[in-house]
Image (tube, rainbow, N blue to C red):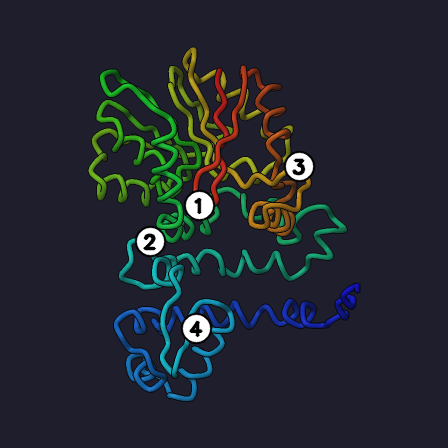
Amino acid sequence: MSLPAAQPSPERFFSTVNAYQATAAIKAAVELDLFTAIAEGNATASAIAERCQATERGARILSDFLVVMGFLTKQDGQYGLTPDSAVFLDKRSPAYLGGALEFLLDPMMLAGQDDIAGAVRKGGTTISEEGSVSPENPVWVKFARAMMPLMMPAAQGMAALVKTDPNRNVKLLDIAAGHGIFGISFAQANPNLVVTALDWAAVLEVARENAQKFGVVDRYHWLPGSAFEVEFGAGYDIVLLTNFLHHFDAATNEALLKKIHAALADGGQVVTLEFIPNDDRVSPPMHAGFALTMLASTAAGDAYTFAELQRMFSNAGFAGSELHELPPSFRVVISRK
């Protein structure tokens, strides 16, 4: 006996159209410090309301919505944090991500999403000619200050993946260094590794602060400017390319990779962290979905498959590239000169 076919439902349509409520709810919860309040033991709507200086009705409705979204649990009128919320949304956690909202919900970033149809017609962002990669764009200072906790696991994973000899001097170039945590993690792993961080001058001030904080500032140097215009120097053993290539078209990337190839010492390697969808371009969801972000915010960026990245590196003169998975959801390409 065959089972009856599933009936069509409008539920996915309405949940998608109303998705702005989910964004607004998580933003409100972070602003009210609701997750930290629950982590401190304020488990009822009344206790949450008192801690967050809100009304009980408001605290109850918002908390219930966060349960529906999967950010909270609820049993016998008591709210609790899910494992993910405990790690990423309790302000006392070293992996706290609430600060990332300042970048992720920046008006310029949101503006690109207002006219996806226009971006589809144009083939790129409708914000401006260059979108988010315009020179000295202040949004990247927000990025540097907000996103370090999210990138810390990837940075430490990359430093563990790329072994360096602690008994010899190692030169590392960190392109689009941002908060600096990638190069900093490599410097922490090897006392004889020296970092040159490249980014806009205002962004490098954030990297400088973090290098001081993590105790490597004496081996941390700054190279302000555009990666396409600044002279890198030569003799680098490692070049880091983190979340950068997706902003540009393949030809622009290949020109940069040729410049990097020339700056590497013989046997040097490039470590690239990217959103890398599978060849079907629809999986895994986080990597595949990032292509739409690039359509909305850049003139010609994309989420490139490994085959496409491999071809770019090959065309730039690299001997070979390997794809590595870094838990929980990062993908890294290592390319050798």
Discs 1/2, front: 1
Q: Looking at this view, is 188 or 285 the one in front? A: 285
- Residue 65's label in the rendered image is none
What amino acid type is highlighted by mark number 3? Answer: Asp
| Residue at (55% x, 48% y) in the render | 132
State the residue lying farthest toward the front: 1
Q: Is residue 144 above or below residue 20?
A: above
Residue 78 percent location from the top left of the image: 36, 80
**Amino acid identity at mark 4:** Ala
From the image, which quarter does the N terminus lie in?
A: bottom right
Residue at 57 percent of width and 39 percent of height: 276
Above or below, 191 against 126 in this view is above
Residue highlighted by disc 2: 95
User: What amino acid does circle 1 point to?
Assistant: Pro
In the picture, the disc for residue 28 is: 4
- The image quadrant that residue 161 belongs to is top left
Position of 334 relative to 26 (above/below): above
Q: CA distance from mark 1 to mark 4?
A: 27 Å
Nearer the observer: mark 3 or 2; the answer is 3
